[in-house]
Image: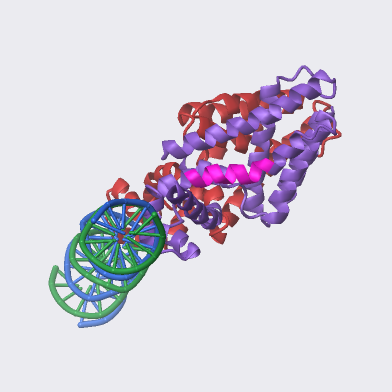
Chain colours: A red, B purple, C blue, D green
Amino acid sequence: MQKTLKHEIKADYLLEKGIHILWSKGYNATSVNDIVMAAGVPKGSFYFYFDSKEDFAVKAIEKYFEAQFSPARKILENEDLSPKQRLLDFYLYRCTILKEEMDCKMGCLASNIGNEMSEHSESIRLKILEKETLVLACIREVVEEAQNRGEIDASLVPQDLVAFLEDAGKGAMITMKEMQSSYPVDNFLQMVNRVLFK
Amino acid sequence: MQKTLKHEIKADYLLEKGIHILWSKGYNATSVNDIVMAAGVPKGSFYFYFDSKEDFAVKAIEKYFEAQFSPARKILENEDLSPKQRLLDFYLYRCTILKEEMDCKMGCLASNIGNEMSEHSESIRLKILEKETLVLACIREVVEEAQNRGEIDASLVPQDLVAFLEDAGKGAMITMKEMQSSYPVDNFLQMVNRVLFK
DNA sequence: ATTAAATAAACGACTGGTCAACTAGTCAAT
DNA sequence: ATTGACTAGTTGACCAGTCGTTTATTTAAT
């Protein structure tokens, strides 16, 4: 068991170092060499901890979601605030991260890799789908709560509304990368306010 | 000048054959070999017609926009219909293309390449930005017309509305690829109707 | 004769992945 | 307590193949 723990720790270290490269350069432009060099680990070790580059990417996506979504989820589940306020805070938080932490240039790892690889790697596609479904479910719960309280137009189908908002955010993120400006994300936020408050 | 014409024709032929590969596989996963093999042309010729792979991509994006946006633009400029109806038709048309012609798997070349390459190729980034700005302007014109006629809520800033809709469509397209389902795009369309009709 | 165009071969660099040799530590049997 | 078998972990050389690009040369049209 000690071995297994140690194994996991080092695999996690590789992931930690590799995620940012994968995030910034995408899948195909990131080489196994890039990853092991960033981690200061010989190439052979990589294949002791991961079956393949694809396997690494799948695990990187998993780790990415855990790291990124956890704090956002806390906002969503903060019982001190009204559901609607939680939703607004949630989107504000995520947009702020996008803009500030990543200089409007990196977007979201899952979205980047998903767009690049969905057609060509089923395991990557399914992993992203799995995680995004989870995120959608969390948001939808709060939307339903808000509708029950009459804070949000109850004629909107929660699933559809949430899917639309997530997609709109996704698109704004990509345009943000293209423009290297925060305008699309700011605009998205303003529109979210408008939709949710209408 | 005859030479130049012939030159252009063959360059165009290369582009035509290469665009679909670039579209489907993305930039990094598409090799110059893939392109010349698809066109049945020896590799050396490629570099007679294009400075580099990057140059090829830039020109492919240009050609792609011309081919894809032209018919959509006609819908937008059809004076027989009201501006609002034109907008609805326009989005319906583009979504239909996305779903049917490409089996929910390919999305939009510009969006794919933009997301993959914006951070790493300034020439690609700027070309996409240029073309998308043009598209935005065309749509905005019709929105303004619709607002003047009172068909669309005049309190919405046209630029912001159009940017938001385009981004939402972009995001829906990516999710469509991830889900391999038309739901995101159908949902987008329904939401557009809701926003424009409100 | 001039020159655009076409071509195959080759370039060095790099790719994802393999592998046999090696180290260090564990544990059971002596 | 010491041994030897075993094993998790480590390592860099190496593989066959591909990458984007360049080149020298040939072909074809003017």
Does any portion of residue B49 appear in the rendered image?
A: yes
Q: Magenta: predominant secondary structure element?
A: helix
Q: Nearer the viewer, residue A55 or B156?
A: B156
**Which residue sits at x=51%, y=47%?**
B60
Does any portion of residue A78 appear in the rendered image?
A: no
From the top left corner, tell me how far across and down residue B100 is, in percent. Answer: 72, 55
**Which residue sits at x=60%, y=24%?**
A186
Can residue B69 be found in the magenta stretch? yes
From the top left corner, tell me how far across and down residue A25 is, in percent. Answer: 42, 44
Left or right of B114 in this view: A147: right
Left or right of C12 in this view: B91: right
**Which residue sits at x=61%, y=38%?**
A170
Left or right of A160 in this view: A117: left
Name above or below for residue A117 compared with residue A146: below
- Location of residue B148 (image quadrant): top right
From the top left corner, tell me how far across and down residue B155 is, in percent. Answer: 77, 17
Name above or below for residue B43 compared with residue A24: below
Can residue A198 be found in the magenta stretch? no
Q: Nearer the viewer, residue A119 or D6?
A: A119
Q: Nearer the viewer, residue B159 or D5?
A: B159
The magenta region covers B59-70
Quadrant of the drawing holding the C terminus of chain B: top right
Name above or below for residue A161 compared with residue C24: above
**Which residue sits at x=66%, y=23%?**
B159
Q: Nearer the viewer, residue A112 or D23?
A: D23
Task: Please count the marks in the image.
Answer: 0
From the top left corner, tell me how far across and down residue B93 is, in percent. Answer: 75, 44
